Amino acid sequence: MEKSTRREEILQILEQNSRLTAADIAAMIGAEEAEVAEQIAEMEKDKTICGYRTVINWEKTSDERVTAQIGVKIAPVRGEGFDRIAARLSRFEEVDSVYLMSGSSYDLILTIGGKSMKDIAHFVYDKIAPMETVVSTSTYFVLRKYKDHGQVFDEGRETDERIPGIS
């Protein structure tokens, strides 16, 4: 099998369950364990695989957390576009993800986490808004996660909880 096809297979399997061992994956795709382990090590080294993450439904814990998505309108810097500001925003511990967008009134979308809405508000007006190239921001608080990183939360909750007769 072609090396790139094998890599894609391994990546798809790891994306679904990063706890599988090289031996597990080798058995699934009909390859040698050593070959799979070598491919995984190679992809970790070249940053194709950037890390491994556990998806947690924080609503099932007593830990209070708030997630927000922040739209950021940028005045791009000549010769740098959005890269410099995106890299700067990426360095903040509170920032989980930074995406360059198209088809939106915002250039960047950030996903951030905090202990409260107030923490997130402070982050926006203390750290993001004062940046020289930031034109405007818009914050959207996540009220409930139904699916995150491909993982569906509370699959059994498909019952209609509205009061009968009221639409």
Image: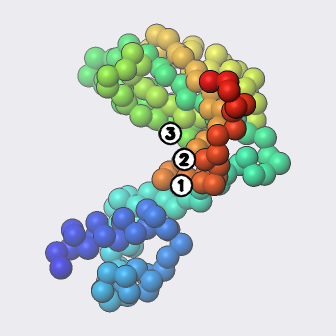
Q: Secondary structure at mark 1?
A: strand
Q: Amino acid at mark 3?
A: Ser
Q: Position of residue 42 (x, y in %)?
A: 34, 70
How far is disc 3 from disc 2 in space, using C-alphas?
16 Å
How far is disc 2 from disc 1 in space, using C-alphas?
5 Å
- As displayed, is residue 126 above or below residue 156? above
Q: Is residue 34 left or right of residue 164?
A: left
Query: Which residue is tagged 2?
Result: 147
Report the front residue among 56 and 38.
Answer: 56
Q: Amino acid at mark 1?
A: Gln
Query: Which residue is tagged 3?
Result: 97
Q: Secondary structure at mark 3?
A: strand
Which tag is nearer the camera, tag 3 or tag 2?
Answer: 2
How are the residues colored? rainbow
Q: Secondary structure at mark 2?
A: strand
Query: Which residue is tagged 1?
Result: 151
Q: Position of residue 123 (x, y in %)?
A: 66, 24
The residue depicted at 50 percent of the width and 39 percent of the height is 97
Which quadrant is home to the C terminus? top right
Q: Residue furthest right?
A: 62
Q: Quick one: label 3 or label 2, which is nearer the N terminus?
A: 3
- As displayed, is residue 115 above or below residue 34? above
